[in-house]
Image (cartoon, rainbow, N blue to C red):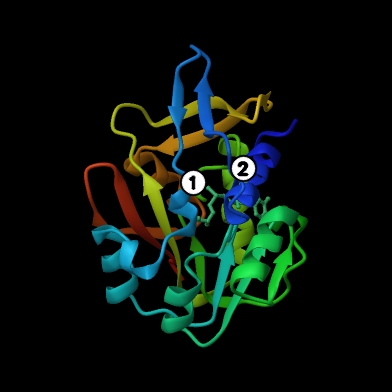
Amino acid sequence: MKSMDLFWEALYDYHKWIQKWPFYLVNKQWNKFELDLWLYFRNIKDINELEKKLFNNVKWKNILDVGCGTAFYFPLLQNNSNYVEWIDISNLAIKIATEKWIKNVRCEDIFDEKIKKQYETITLLWNNLSIWWDIKWTKKLIWILKSILKKDWKILSILKKENDNDYFIWKFSCKYNGKKSETFKWIRFNIKYLWLLLKKEWLKLKILCKNDYWYCLEIKKQF
Ligand SMILES: C[S@@+](CC[C@H](N)C(=O)[O-])C[C@H]1O[C@@H](n2cnc3c(N)ncnc32)[C@H](O)[C@@H]1O
């Protein structure tokens, strides 16, 4: 079973109040980490200090939220801009987002390159810059996002820190309801490495705010 399918099965059960089992991430050494699915169903009052800084201090306009998930950021994004488009590759994500919040959410793979217009703000929230398997796919994503970003505007991202290496690829599977998924990869970038990677694509990286574990980043076109 694909890793994200199991993640979405668990989130859909949680959404329907029928979650009977904990959801685990399991690494190669068989260490288990329980993931609190509540994170994806938070209310505005539950957002942390880092998120508050991002949402309160940054100028947003015409937003595309890539990999919107349950779209729990709906009230905040809607407050910051009267125009938001939402896309996610998962049908179950779209089902939850539609049942809870929004109608204009599309099931779409960002790599299909169907988007022909440009946006002022593109959001990659909670590690969505890191979920693309390897550096090759991250570069492809950056290239696609650059082509749909308006000049002088920005990509906003919340990203997990990596301090030791250029990047670190974390491999894990999901475990839920007696099922185990295929292995999934998640990349953590060192900020200097990411800065270089973006510079090669003529993109500027700025740290908007940070805490011990996470960065809020702004990415803009250089010209
Ligand atoms: C880490 S979750 C983050 C969800 C949400 N942004 C949040 O902050 O709660 C990553 C999301 O990206 C979606 N995703 C993965 N690959 C995608 C793709 N190729 N195109 C669009 N969405 C994708 C997944 O289905 C999932 O909802």
Q: Position of residue 175 (x, y in %)?
A: 60, 27
| Viewer-nearest residue: 163 or 75 | 75
Query: Which quadrant holds residue 135?
Result: top right
Residue hosting label 2: 10
Residue hosting label 1: 37
Q: Position of residue 52 (x, y in %)?
A: 28, 67
Q: Which residue is farthest bottom?
A: 82
Instruction: Check if mark 1's residue and mark 2's residue have beta carbons within 8 Å.
Output: yes
Q: Position of residue 12 (x, y in %)?
A: 64, 51
Give the secondary structure at mark 2: helix
41 horizontally vs 166: left or right = right
126 horizontally vs 46: left or right = right
For label 2, being within 8 Å of ligand 1 is answered: no
Is any part of residue 64 visible from this angle?
yes
Residue found 49% across the figure and 35% down from its top? 187
What residue type is disc 2 on?
Ala
Residue found 73% across the figure and 73% down from its top? 116
Q: Position of residue 67 (x, y in %)?
A: 60, 57
| Quarter of the N terminus within the rendering | top right
Up-down relation of residue 53 to residue 142 (above or below): below
